Amino acid sequence: MSLQQLVNGMSLGSVYALIAVGFAMVFNILKFSNFSHGGLMTLTAYIGYVGTILFVKQLDSIPLFLATITTAAIAGGVVAMGVERVAFRRLRNNNSPVIYYFISSITMGILMENLVTVFASSNFYSYPKFFASTAITFLSITIAVSDLLMLLFSTCALCIIMWVLYKTKIGLAIRALSYDVNTASLMGMDPNFVVMVTFIASGVLGGISGVFLGINYTLYPQLGQLIVKGFIASVIGGLGSITGAMIGAVLLGVVEVTLIGLVGAGIAPAFLFIIMLLFLLIRPRGIAGVIVQEKA
């Protein structure tokens, strides 16, 4: 594997890490796979696109790019808060079976994708060109500006999330709730507030990743199906571990870029699913080695 492929793979893996960590944060507390995250990514990618169109006459280059990312991130947080309130709060208060969470998350994801189709049609859209230069060369390595920004922004966003989780009181509350909701409640924590904050943080990451996916793959209503890559990364890293999800995502990005170079883009996804199945058969707890149980 060349250094060029490694850099490209890390850039792609950094976006997968945003998806996987957003996915893992909800799984960490409620222990269900929140597939509505895919619909949220689609919706916020389109909202970011609308923001770009609105700002393009007033802003240019980096300010326009930052305004787009900020718009999508805020929208992601607001949408995630609404999803938690509408789709999962009542289920949690009623101690509903975990299958209800799964069905509700799938339904919300489809609903958001259909809303996008209704208001924006099924046509493909492309983000406008943010920068005059599309690629830079450093030490014989050529990297697209969008890939470099993906790597930088994703790394910064993940560092901030890890700082919040391990250095703040709300992060401590989130980690405590992930171990035992009932005990955390007895210690005076408000589980509804902590879960809502977790969804907002997950939504912010979903909004940022939605914009990057939209820049890389163009916009279409089924863009959120790329959440499967985040799910694969979580399985490889360990569904109960946020750090494992980050490691698994970077590995997935590097492996995917390498496979595309070896066997082509058409068949590379099949190998990725085989790798995921091998992990489930040989090491179901993933790289991080965390054992989780469904509880919701």
Image (cartoon, grey):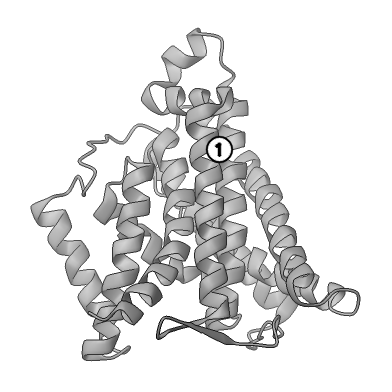
Residue beneath the point at 44% across and 33% down: 96
Q: Using residue 146 as the reference point, say whether residue 232 is left or right of it.
A: left
> Looking at this rendering, what residue extends furthest in the front direction?
139
Q: Quadrant of residue 193?
A: top right
> Looking at this rendering, what residue extends furthest in the top direction?
187
Give the structural element (helix, strand or loop) at label 1: helix
Q: Is residue 74 visible?
A: yes
Q: How many numbered discs?
A: 1
Q: Quadrant of residue 212?
A: bottom right
| Relative image position of residue 121 (x, y in whole percent) | 69, 83
The amino acid marked with disc number 1 is Thr
Q: Quadrant of residue 45?
A: bottom right
Q: Which residue is mark 1?
A: 198
Q: Using residue 193 as the reference point, say whether residue 261 is left or right of it.
A: left
> Looking at this rendering, what residue extends furthest in the right direction?
58
- Figure check: 293 above or below 14: above
| Relative image position of residue 165 (x, y in whole percent) | 50, 33
Q: Is residue 222 visible?
A: no
Residue beneath the point at 22% across and 36% down: 291
Q: Is the C terminus in the top left, top right, bottom left or bottom right quadrant?
A: top left
The residue nearer to you, when weighing 99 against 181, is 181
Residue beneath the point at 58% across and 83% down: 218
Q: Using residue 139 as the reference point, say whether residue 266 is left or right of it.
A: left
| Relative image position of residue 290 (x, y in whole percent) | 24, 38
| Relative image position of residue 266 (x, y in whole percent) | 31, 90
Q: Is the N terminus in the top left, top right, bottom left or bottom right quadrant?
A: bottom left
The residue nearer to you, when weighing 119 against 136, is 136
Crowdedness of circle 1 by 10 Å Cα count: few (<14), some, many (20+)? many
- Figure check: 246 above or below 86: below
